[in-house]
Image (tube, rainbow, N blue to C red):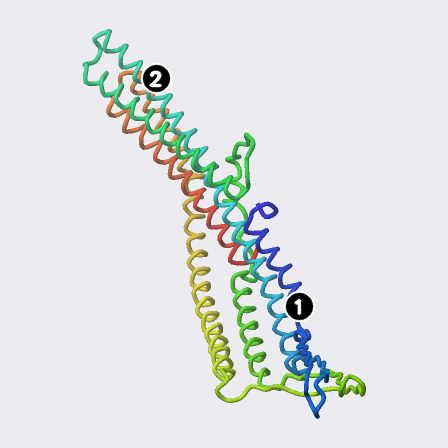
Amino acid sequence: ALRSHPRMTAAELAVQEQEAMRKTAFGLQPINAQFMHGQIQGPYRSDINLQATTGFAFPTTIARRAGYLKESMRLAESEKLSAASVVKESAGTAYLQWAMGHEQVRLLQQLDSAYASMAAFAAKRFELGATGRLEKTSAQSRAEQVKLRVRQAEAELLAYQAEVERWSGTLNGAVPLPVELTNTAHAPDPGGGQDPMILALEQRTQVAQAEWELQRSQWAPSLQGGGFYQTFDGKSPFSGYLIGATMPLPGSGQGARTKAARLRSEIAAQELEIARRERNVERTTTQAQLMQLRESLNYYESTGSDLATTLRDDAERAYRAGEADYFQFTQGFEQAFQIEAEHLRTRYELALTILHLRALNGR
């Protein structure tokens, strides 16, 4: 996903764009050329005057522009890292959702097989007169309901697969590995690192500061230079050079542009502080959620899974032995399925939490 996703391609192109822009720190203004012919000085009507001038920014302005372009280049690089973090987390989230959906289909298929078997068993009991029509009809109805749930889960799985392809491209028949849910859920807590989003916002404040300094430097004059060639009656040519300067005056708008740049710099600093506070809260909340989910996973792995197996086996054995009616059987089976479904949900949410903490810590 990091290599092929359009978002990463766009981020890389943005870096290349800023690399190209750095070469514009110093540049000559377009040449202003003028040609005059006629009566310029004296009585002669065939005088010629040719002059050309160009200009460039004051050295301090050039230095400030170079600094601004350098900071812009760093911003593009930091935004590329931030984009990589987003793509990595999003692709990982989509894959884990796909794996979870695959496991969900498997659980429902097991439930479907059990209910289909019990529906056939109930029908046989009805034929033998061991039970009434209500039990037979209820068993058939419950079996059909579970089949519908299987079809719905399979449709959701296709949607999850499409989301994976959105981030990674065509899958070419690949299937998810549900073990990745368990592996990610059991991964160690991500260590501390630098949040890519905060790094990008910090660099954005540097760009805003550099832009303000650049606008302040625009009060310096721009330098101009050139030369001229002139004749009197086409017979007495002479030449020389021109030196000048242009500078903004009050009312030219430069003061307003400088003030606006200063305000943008202050806004960027405040937005950075807001983001820092929000991400700190988000990190703390996510860490607390991680601890809660680890405790839940420990319960399901140490007790819950065995309890679900016992409920399922005992319910089926008791029903077949005539020790429990069909409604008691379904109650035990549904409880077992609910435990397994909650176990799957806990693994999935814990894996997502690990991924998000990695993104928050720049891992």
Q: Position of residue 314 (x, y in %)?
A: 34, 24
Q: Position of residue 323 (x, y in %)?
A: 26, 19
Q: Nearer the viewer, residue 138 or 328?
A: 138
Is 227 placed above or below 14 here? below
**Residue at the spot 66% in from the left edge and 63% down from the top edge:** 19
Quadrant in which the C terminus appears: bottom right
Q: Nearer the viewer, residue 269 or 239?
A: 239
Tag on residue 117? 2
On the picture, is 321 further left or further right than 214? left
Is 299 placed above or below 269 here? above
Q: Nearer the viewer, residue 170 or 285?
A: 170
Q: Dot 2: what SS?
A: helix
The type of residue carrying mark 1 is Arg
Q: Position of residue 96 (x, y in %)?
A: 48, 41
Q: Which residue corresponds to mark 1?
A: 22
The type of residue carrying mark 2 is Ser
On the picture, is 238 further left or further right than 220? right
**Residue at the spot 58% in from the left edge and 65% down from the top edge:** 75
On the picture, is 6 further left or further right than 325? right
Q: CA distance from mark 2 to mark 1?
A: 73 Å
Residue count near mark 2 (Cα–Cα under 10 Å), binned few <14, some 14–19, many ≥20: some
Q: Position of residue 150 (x, y in %)?
A: 37, 28
**Residue at the spot 61% in from the left edge and 86% down from the top edge:** 246
Instruction: Name the mark nearer the viewer: 2 or 1.
Output: 1
Quadrant in which the N terminus appears: top right
**Residue at the spot 27% in from the left edge and 16% down from the top edge:** 322
- Between discs 2 and 1, the one toward the N terminus: 1
Residue count near mark 1 (Cα–Cα under 10 Å), binned few <14, some 14–19, many ≥20: some
